[in-house]
Image (cartoon, rainbow, N blue to C red):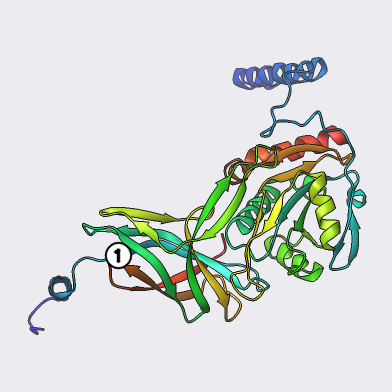
Amino acid sequence: MPPMLSPGARARAGGLAVALALLTFAAAASPPTIELQQAWVRWLPPTVPDTALFGMLINPTDHAVRLVGGTTPAAKRCVPMTTVRKDTGSASGPVMEMVSVDALVIPAHGRLVLEPGGDHLMIMGLQKALVAGQPMQVTLMFEGADALTVSVPVVRK
Amino acid sequence: MKRVPKGVLWAAAVVAVAALAYVVQGRLGGPPYQFASKPLTNLTTEADFTLQSASGPISLSDFDGDVVVLYFGYTHCPNICPTEMMHLAEVRKLLPEKDRSRVKVLMITVDPERDSPVTMSKYAHAFDPAFVGLSGTSESIAAVAKQFFVTYQKTDQTGPDQYFVNHTSAAYVLDTRRQLALIYNYDQLGSEQTHIAQDLHHLLLRGS
């Protein structure tokens, strides 16, 4: 850093350097891959050995990508699941059936919403009790894109 | 003597007229209260059952005079059941404080094999310390479910002691006389909590 620069100029120069570094990194990295936004893992009482990851997967690529599973140091396995509503025709409302699937599809230039009552990544066989506010590291495995490792907050909602 | 400002007199007059209108409307019946769920007037039998809580047997009749919300689910469900339990906890928070102790939320397991009374109690308390978790024998759970048209079915095992239980997802509200009054589906529980809290308040008013 040149010593004659004012603190403001120094900060600007620093910012520029970071931006340049990021640009270089982006140019050097593999083609755009899957992004996970607004992700959260549901906090559940310690009696429950399973939980689920929710959020939105963004696919900027030209081809459909399949979420086929995942891994986490916090649990034994991660399984893509979907929820099938089966109308019973009675006042008791539909049966919400959880069905494990081989993959959940993120369309080309599209998104896949993982939400309670819908598609989600079930996290099964938790090693220890969930603590709200603490992050959980999860690696999502795809077909058609690189794996994605994210740190996702455990949220009570 | 000080003159009362005109504005204050007008305000007082408006309040008086509004109060009178309110009283007259009340006397004449007024428009009926609109529940978020269709009131179930054709079901008039008194419900009852006895199931096991962590601290011993609990009967529905123990809550006579209160409004009871029943939810059938299981603790190994990470998706639907916790969502609905959290929504019910939110509904209870929206109630006027004096109503809160008179609205009892009971969660009944549809998976008695894995959910003991203690498991159910811990699970229910995690959402709201006032919630009650109940289990029982497979036969007693089946009998209670039948009273409320609840259906549930175990799926194929995916591993040792690993399976899902597909079940209907509604919440049932019993009035202060143990009569099934309202049913809310999954979507309503998620989006109409304020209205549901008003419904419960209204049922308490009607019963007292």
Q: Nearer the viewer, residue A45 or A57?
A: A57
Q: Secondary structure at mark 1?
A: loop
Classed neighbour count for the residue bearing mark 1: other residues with Cα under 10 Å, few (<14), some (14–19), many (≥20): many
Q: Quadrant of the N terminus of chain B?
A: top right
Q: Which residue is mark 1?
A: A34
Q: Can you say whether B72 is above or below B188 in the image?
A: below
**Amino acid type at mark 1:** Ile
Residue at 44% over, 70% down: A152
Q: Residue B56: x percent and y percent?
A: 90, 66
Q: Can you say whether B198 is above or below B4 in the image?
A: below
Tell which subunit mark 1 falls on: A
Residue at 25% over, 66% down: A33
Q: Quadrant of residue A97?
A: bottom right
Q: Nearer the viewer, residue B8 or B19?
A: B19
Residue B98 visible in the shown view: no
Q: Residue B204: x percent and y percent?
A: 82, 38
Horizontally, residue A7 falls left or right of residue A98, namely left
Q: Residue A100: x percent and y percent?
A: 51, 62
